Amino acid sequence: MLISVKASIEWLREYVDLEASTNELVDVFPMLGMEVEGVEDSGPPPLDNVVVGEVISRDQHPEADRLSVCKVKVGEGIPEANIVCGATNFEPGDRVPVALPGAKLPGGFKIKKSKLRGVTSEGMMCSSKELSLGDDHDGLLILREKPEIGTPINQVFPDADPTFDLELTANRGDCLGHLGIARELAAHYDKALRVPEVKSDAPTVATPSGDNLLSGVSISSSNCKLYCAWTIRGVKVGPSPDWLRNRLEAVGLRSINNVVDATNFVLMETGHPLHAFDAKKIAGSEIIVRDANADETITTLDEEKRTLEESMMVIADAEKPLVVAGVMGSVDAEVDEDTKDLVLEAAWFVPGNIRGTARKLGLSTDSSHRFARDVDPQRIRFAARRAIDLILETAGGELYPEEVQVGEPPRGDRTIEICPSFVRERCGYEAEDERIGKAWLRLGFEVEKGDKWKVTVPSFRSEVDRPIDLVEEFVRIDGTSQIPESPVACEAISREHSPLFTFSEKAADILVGQGFRECCNYSLRDAREIEAWHGKETTDALALANPLTAEHTHLRASLLPGLLDTLAHNQRNQNDLRRVFEIGRVLRDGPKGNMELLSVAFAMLSKHTAREWKEEATPDFHEAKRCAHRLLAATGISMPKGGIKAMKDPLTWQQDHAGRAGEVLINRVELSVGYCKLALSRAKELNGPIIGAELLIDPVVISKKAKAVKFQAFGSFPPALKDLALVVDEEVPAETVRRAVQQAAEKAAGKGFAADRVNIFDVFTGQGVEKGKKSVACGICFRSDERTLEDKEVNSAFDEIQSILAESTDYKLRS
């Protein structure tokens, strides 16, 4: 699974000297394990006639309640422009971007002098979105740094800041902040990493003192191992400075206010989520980290009321939850323009709990994205102190000299023992000891050399915990280009070498040759359909733990339901599609749980969908059986012993109109053929009964090496034919009689000849045959490959057949 993050090049250059071009970095990032999904420029395109203007006056439009008429100074010696504007977030004295007549804005919008509700407008004051400087279009872009009036806007925002959309593997949570990405680039280019210096600090205490804004901090949930809180008095909440707004907008975040922006800046810088509370909104001045109560509710910052479960964790005060821990805060304690005192939290939560909470609530945020990937518990204090510095710089206030800490970091740095020879063996090429050690040092690891090297891995690299991980890190930083080329020492293997592919191709060929058309249906099915075809036990066994939709909740146990869907769809649309087949995987119950089997299934309409001038023969059970036999013969699968026997399947097949041969658990092959249960075909609104078959095969059978095919010449001498009519009980299958005659003929055949075949040519009931009995007539063919048979030896064999049958069966010779 991949995770995404945005990285601004200008922001990265604050931590490492980067001389590489954007195109070069596009190639470098994948070598470091970060795929580049796209590159965006956050700066404006070239904009002519867009300059800095200052609002001189603002008056109500005489004909429109929501418009104002402004006088705007756009340069020295230039008459003030009269501009009609609908925004409300500005006052006289503010400086804003002004597009003058003749300007062409992103998107092709041209500015010209025009009248709005009777008042002439000589330009347009612009928002960030209109200049492609951000997504904010709720009001004008206020230029708080007060650039000189008349300055072209491209000089105010001179350089586009390329922003990379990167995708990381799920174990690289350390790169979900600009510092982590800069560390990787510094290691790649062998440059120094500049970590920001933090000034704010306070002694750690377990319990707040009496002068603290907090009266207590406690943890009762096992999913929180560390919680830290700081308090700041006397802040002034307001707009952020331009540099802070620009940094956030470059990575797709909207500026809120200076306090919230400071925490979001640190989030994007370090990858550590923080949260700021309005201290006066915390009931009882107490912070409690606890599991949520059943059906407890909270209104999150997106103004959605959410119902919590006991498996979720909240940050609460004495009365109510204030934050869905690790996911999103509530409106009950948010920082707004009236906030004077702050509580800043930093914590470490169990990643699995945050991941589960976000998934259940359907709420993925920048914070949950990072907590779910395991933030570094050893650098929580650094992130918080960095945020405090920014808050004091942009919002003022005074830090109370206490850090309230409950719990301990769950992990720290780890030491791994390794030998350089191990690295060389695993890499497959020679690398000097110094080169190996330097690669690890560039990553921020510590290396103690000796008989066995001891490499200390910092806590922010939680995924590096084995010697083989150190080998991977060496190769990554040393460069995969250093790996010498070597020819592949194996034969090329294609799908044509796969017995399963070959079998499927043969099966498809033989069915297409019999008039069937192949189709491919979705492998996930509906629960009600599975239960109707296979029963509740199978339905429960094939249920998905995390279904994508309500209609696709189970793995399939048969291909037949999908084939019936295909026939029904084409019948509704008057398409003349009568025979369909599919080849795919299904699951059935086995001794050790579900078994995956290869299935070949076909289905036929017994009635035509279109009117014909000439009535054609309609398919029946025997035709389906012949198709199945041809399929077995063509694919080299042997018919299970016993042949097809009548079956009574109360769910899938019509009673007394279906048969089955073999069983997967015994023969590893199972063939079912007959009429699908009428209730199932009617549920699909099909016209008439459906004849189908399904061949289930354990893939082990196909994976075995096929036996060599032996060809045998046809006999050149004429056969000797004999007919034998036997009276048997009416319920005895004709095939059972044929096999008995075949076995007797094989035993009775004389020296130098054999029973070539035995076939049934007549089954009769009626006059001359006792009630409850039937006559089965078989033709017996004797043949020799060496000579023409004499009547004497054929008659002798025929008499012997009758004797054998008289002794081994209760069949009577028909007179």
Image: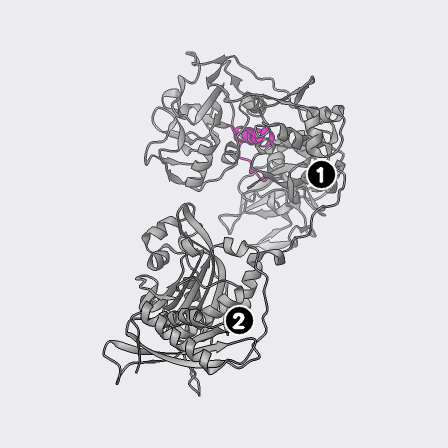
Badge 2: residue crowd in 10 Å (few <14, some 14–19, many ≥20): some
The amino acid beneath tag 1 is: Val
Bounds of the magenta span? 251-274
Q: Residue furthest left?
A: 771
Residue under the point 58% across and 32% down: 268
Magenta highlight on residue 593: no
Badge 1: residue crowd in 10 Å (few <14, some 14–19, many ≥20): some
- With respect to residue 591, does 329 lie above or below? above
Instruction: Give residue 434's quadrant in the image.
Output: top right
Judging depth in this view, the residue of 765 and 738 nearest the camera is 738
Judging depth in this view, the residue of 429 and 457 nearest the camera is 429
Please, what secondary structure does the residue beneath circle 2 have? Answer: helix
Residue 788, percent from left and from top: 53, 81
Q: Is residue 81 left or right of residue 1?
A: right
The amino acid beneath tag 2 is: Val
Residue under the point 70% across and 35% down: 148
Could you tell me if residue 194 is visible in this image? yes
Residue 320, percent from left and from top: 35, 29
Could you tell me if residue 327 is visible in this image? no
Magenta highlight on residue 253: yes
Q: Residue furthest bottom?
A: 613
Residue tagged by mark 1? Answer: 28
Residue under the point 53% across and 63% down: 636
Q: Which mark is residue 512?
A: 2
Q: CA distance from mark 1 to mark 2?
A: 51 Å
Question: Looking at the image, is mark 1 or mark 2 earlier in the sequence?
Answer: 1
Which quadrant, please, contains the C terminus?
bottom left
Residue 234, percent from left and from top: 50, 20
Judging depth in this view, the residue of 616 and 88 nearest the camera is 616
